[in-house]
Image: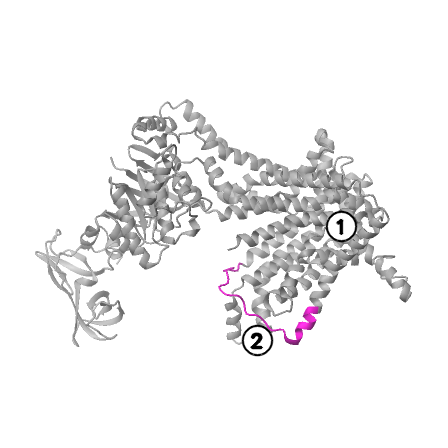
């Protein structure tokens, strides 16, 4: 039985659809990242699961229990879901200890509070007030509070967005370790790809209220299910290609690979910046439009002379080309490329 | 919608044997085995439906009470429509409209002329003694209009203190008459300019200095910048403050009554006293109409201009006054002299004279107790009643709650005398047991002061981020438990502030108390009124001083609290 199961969830706000026919299962003990551009409905999914919003249609089950379905709505206090909010939502009038104890009842809650605070590395801070803590500490208190009642699933809404970059990286590791240590199932929302790929055992990519693909991070790169996923993950460019018997024939060269489409079909191959090779060539097929220096490497935007299509390429920092330099671009992926049928929109 | 939900709940429980709620209970029992003990104790009776229902019921009761005076006056006007029509056609009615509107406009204009320079001088310049002026200039707010009018009239009126002082050395036996329009304008302006001052000061402090710097950088001079950037930026604040001043003038009874200027409130009171009750009711309705027009005008003004009050990142640049600081000082000094020092001096004079003449203070204890208990009970009752309204308005945004908010907001404009009159007639005709009871007085205070209490609670609730309540729900608490353990402790300062505000205004309230207090129930306000209307100026001094002291204490508490809460 999966700890969280969503089936055909839909939710609109004032007739603007936020989530449409969204289905997703999170497996026991798994950390699932819900990734998407802002406004794609990912936070709404989280709030539907937590019970802060009522779905217009669809079903949600937490563990064996259905919590939302037509004619059924279990209020949040009876869902056994732990939630970590973007701004932590620590109760400002309660001490750290009382915050963590809030969801606990009966004897032994003090011991449980101490255990949880030790777990998140804040042992001994029970009597502090939330405003006396740093941002990172507040975040861990919020985590301890959500985990204390041993929820069936932990939900995290953009948990690291309020922290500066250094702290974010450190806390990411800690939070992942804590979640794995407790062994709880977690679903967290983020718009940060790097974070999703680092934290998530699997990543669910959302766009415009739909689920595009849910897969292991590597699979998202290797086999994007939709054009959106290919474009969103890893800044891919699209290169027109024709299917041949033993590969893809593109304007940037031939890529040998098995293709499950009849020969002659026109497709678009997904070319990531690192699949392309640039070389200085006055007779080359492209020119440099712009470049961005990223320390270890340059990211160039190049325009193909024939089609005026622009592509992004990444190059080692020793290859420094000025804007308007003629260059030669070639496809050298070293692996099979993902491809999509030519979309009618283009 | 509520009724429908309740009906669905019933149907679900009775006709569908194994669906919805029941199925869920079944599941949870099956599940109970692998749930930790700490969870099982959370299973309290389900409270999902009824807190919502209770909220709406309480808010609906508040709305009904707020609407009662106006609706009653409307019904009354329609049932006597012939007489009403005749009244409307009489020139005296329109003269009263003109006088009332004219006074309100004049007071607002005069107040702006005093308040805008004061605000600018105390916020943006190197005016000497700036902090002292900032503290002194808003203080006239604690003087009720009838106290102010009594002090000005007794000092500047015919045979008043000023004339007596001038008679011996200079032989002056007549001063320009203060009664009528000049006295009303003078009194109301000096008592109400702080409303504009405070909102203008706040806007000036919040203003991003970069706006003015940008204007200077684009080639505009100091004056041009003030006129083209600063003043337009102040417009919403001036609109809001100006509305408060105009409403103050429109609703005021004490000052116009003592200064004998026949605006609506005074005419209504005279008609009521001479048993011309239908007329009084109709005039009260017209007065309510005037205040509503004013409110709509303000709402429209406010709707058009929205300024981002982004908190300024650095304090605004200070303007060096140079030689202009002397006229500036003179101006501040004159305002404080007239609005504060003069009334205070006159009050002390009458107090000492009364004490020397052996004015009896015996009944003052009982009168004070009456005032304090009425104000305290009304503060508590009104703020409690405001709670469900504020919760609905802040937490359940919908068309219905927006309508509720608008209703409460417009009730802020109701003049005390109109509400009191409506409740008297309503009491006589439909609720005789309530007529002339303490409960009726508290009800009238409730109608008059509920908007203030809702305002304070609304502000406090807006500070509590909904995610706090959602967290608490997720941690296993029902909505009611969440309110008790999280929301209530967090909005307690707002509750206190709201109650203090109601206490302060109830303490000072005159017309409703005058008309609705049970027979023999004298408050400080009515004591001042009856002494002044018989020209026993010395006798009025002690209760007047007590009102000012007792109503300024809560104000000081609120201010201190605000300062302490600000990190």
Q: Is residue B281 magenta?
A: no
Tell which tag, 2 or 1, sits nearer the viewer. 1
Question: Could you tell whether A1 is left or right of B202 in the image?
Answer: left
- Residue B196 falls in which quadrant of the image? bottom right
Q: Quick check: B538 left or right of B117?
A: right
Q: Is residue A284 above or below residue B338?
A: below
| Helix, strand or loop for disc 1 | helix
Which disc, if any, is residue B221? 2
Mark on residue B146? 1
Q: Residue at x 15, y 65 (%)?
A: A252
Query: In front: A35, or B18?
Result: A35
Image spot of residue B373 (x, y percent): 68, 38
User: Residue at 68% across / 56% down in the picture?
Assistant: B139
The subunit letter for the residue under badge 1 reads: B
Q: Which region is colored magenta? A: B306-329
- For marks 2 and 1, the one nearer the N-term is 1
Residue B566: horizontal and vertical position, in percent?
53, 54
As drawn, is B189 to the left or to the right of A253? right
Percent across and percent down for residue A178 are 28, 46
């Amino acid at each position: 039985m999966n700890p969280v199961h969503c089936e055909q969830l839909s939710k609109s706000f004032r007739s603007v659809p936020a989530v449409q026919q969204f289905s997703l299962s999170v497996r026991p003990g798994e950390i699932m990242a819900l990734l998407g551009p802002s406004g794609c409905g990912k936070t709404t999914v989280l709030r539907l699961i937590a019970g802060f919003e009522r779905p217009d249609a669809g079903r949600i089950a937490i563990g064996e229990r259905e919590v939302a379905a037509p004619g059924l709505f279990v209020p949040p206090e009876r869902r056994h879901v732990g939630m970590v909010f973007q701004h932590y939502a620590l109760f400002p009038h309660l001490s750290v200890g009382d915050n963590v104890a809030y969801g606990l009842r009966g004897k032994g809650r003090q011991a449980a509070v101490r255990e949880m605070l030790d777990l998140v590395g804040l042992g001994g801070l029970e009597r502090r007030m939330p405003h006396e803590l740093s941002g990172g500490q507040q975040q861990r208190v919020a985590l301890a509070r959500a985990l204390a009642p041993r929820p069936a699933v932990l939900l995290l809404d953009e948990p690291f967005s309020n922290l500066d970059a250094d702290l974010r990286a450190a806390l990411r590791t800690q939070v992942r370790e804590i979640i794995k240590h407790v062994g709880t199932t977690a679903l967290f929302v983020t718009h940060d790809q790097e974070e999703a790929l680092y934290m998530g055992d699997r990543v669910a990519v959302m766009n415009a209220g739909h689920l595009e693909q849910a897969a292991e991070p590597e699979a998202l790169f290797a086999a994007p299910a939709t054009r959106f996923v290919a474009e969103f993950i890893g800044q891919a460019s699209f290169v027109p290609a024709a299917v041949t018997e033993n590969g893809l024939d593109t304007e940037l060269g031939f890529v040998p690979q098995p293709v499950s489409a009849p020969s002659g079909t026109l497709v678009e191959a997904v070319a990531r910046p690192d699949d392309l090779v640039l070389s200085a060539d006055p007779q080359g097929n492209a020119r440099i439009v712009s470049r961005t220096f990223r320390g270890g490497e340059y990211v160039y935007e190049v325009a193909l002379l024939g089609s005026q299509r622009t592509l992004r390429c990444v190059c080692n920092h020793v290859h420094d080309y000025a804007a308007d330099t003629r260059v030669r671009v070639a496809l050298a992926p070293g692996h099979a490329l993902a491809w999509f049928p030519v979309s009618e929109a283009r | 919608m509520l009724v429908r939900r309740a009906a669905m709940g019933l149907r679900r429980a009775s006709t569908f044997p194994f669906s919805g709620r029941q199925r869920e209970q079944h599941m949870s029992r099956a599940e109970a085995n692998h749930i930790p003990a700490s969870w099982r104790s959370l299973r309290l009776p389900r409270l999902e439906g009824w807190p919502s229902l209770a909220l709406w019921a309480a808010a609906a009761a508040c709305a009904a009470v707020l609407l009662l005076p106006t609706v009653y006056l409307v019904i009354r006007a329609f049932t006597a429509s012939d007489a009403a029509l005749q009244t409307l056609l009489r020139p005296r009615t329109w003269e009263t409209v003109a006088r009332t509107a004219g006074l309100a406009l004049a007071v607002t204009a005069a107040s702006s002329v005093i308040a805008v320079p004061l605000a600018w001088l105390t916020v943006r310049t190197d005016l000497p003694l700036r902090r002292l002026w900032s503290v002194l200039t808003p203080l006239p707010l604690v003087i009720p209009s009838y106290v102010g009018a009594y002090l000005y009239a007794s000092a500047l009126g015919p045979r008043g203190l000023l004339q007596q002082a001038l008679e011996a050395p200079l032989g002056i036996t007549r001063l320009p008459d203060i009664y009528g329009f000049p006295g009303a304008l003078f009194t109301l302006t000096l008592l109400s300019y702080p409303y504009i001052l405070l909102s203008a000061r706040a806007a000036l402090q919040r203003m991003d200095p970069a706006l003015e710097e940008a204007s200077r950088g684009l080639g505009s001079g100091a004056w041009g910048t003030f006129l083209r950037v600063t003043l337009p930026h102040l417009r919403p604040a001036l609109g809001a403050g100006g509305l408060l001043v105009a409403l103050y003038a429109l609703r005021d009874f004490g000052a116009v009554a003592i200064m004998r200027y026949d605006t609506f409130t005074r005419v209504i009171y005279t008609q009521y006293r001479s048993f011309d009750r239908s007329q009084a009711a109709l005039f009260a309705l017209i007065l309510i109409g005037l205040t509503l027009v004013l409110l709509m005008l303000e709402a429209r003004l406010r709707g058009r201009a929205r300024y981002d009050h982004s908190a300024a990142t650095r304090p605004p640049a200070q303007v060096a006054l140079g030689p202009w600081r002397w006229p500036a000082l003179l101006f501040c000094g004159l305002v404080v002299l007239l609005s504060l020092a003069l009334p205070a001096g006159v009050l002390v004079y009458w107090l000492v004279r009364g004490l020397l003449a052996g004015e009896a203070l015996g009944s003052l204890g009982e009168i004070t107790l009456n005032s304090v208990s009425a104000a305290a009970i009304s503060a508590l009752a009104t703020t409690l009643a405001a709670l469900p309204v504020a919760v609905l308005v802040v937490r359940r945004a919908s068309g219905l709650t927006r309508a509720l908010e608008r209703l409460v907001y417009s009730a802020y404009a109701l003049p005390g005398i109109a509400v009191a009159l409506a409740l008297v007639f309503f009491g006589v005709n439909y609720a005789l047991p309530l007529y002339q009871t303490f409960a009726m007085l508290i009800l009238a205070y409730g109608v008059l002061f509920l908007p203030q209490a809702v305002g304070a609670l609304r502000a406090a609730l807006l500070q509590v981020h909904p995610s706090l309540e959602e967290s608490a729900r997720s941690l296993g608490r029902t909505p009611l438990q969440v309110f008790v353990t999280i929301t209530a402790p967090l909005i307690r300062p707002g509750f206190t502030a709201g109650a203090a505000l109601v206490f302060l205004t109830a303490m000072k309230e005159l017309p409703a108390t005058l008309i609705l207090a049970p027979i023999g129930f004298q408050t400080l306000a009515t004591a001042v009124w009856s002494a002044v209307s018989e020209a026993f100026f010395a006798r009025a001094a002690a209760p007047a001083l007590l009102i000012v002291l007792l109503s300024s204490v809560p104000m000081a508490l609120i201010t201190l609290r605000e300062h302490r809460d600000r990190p």
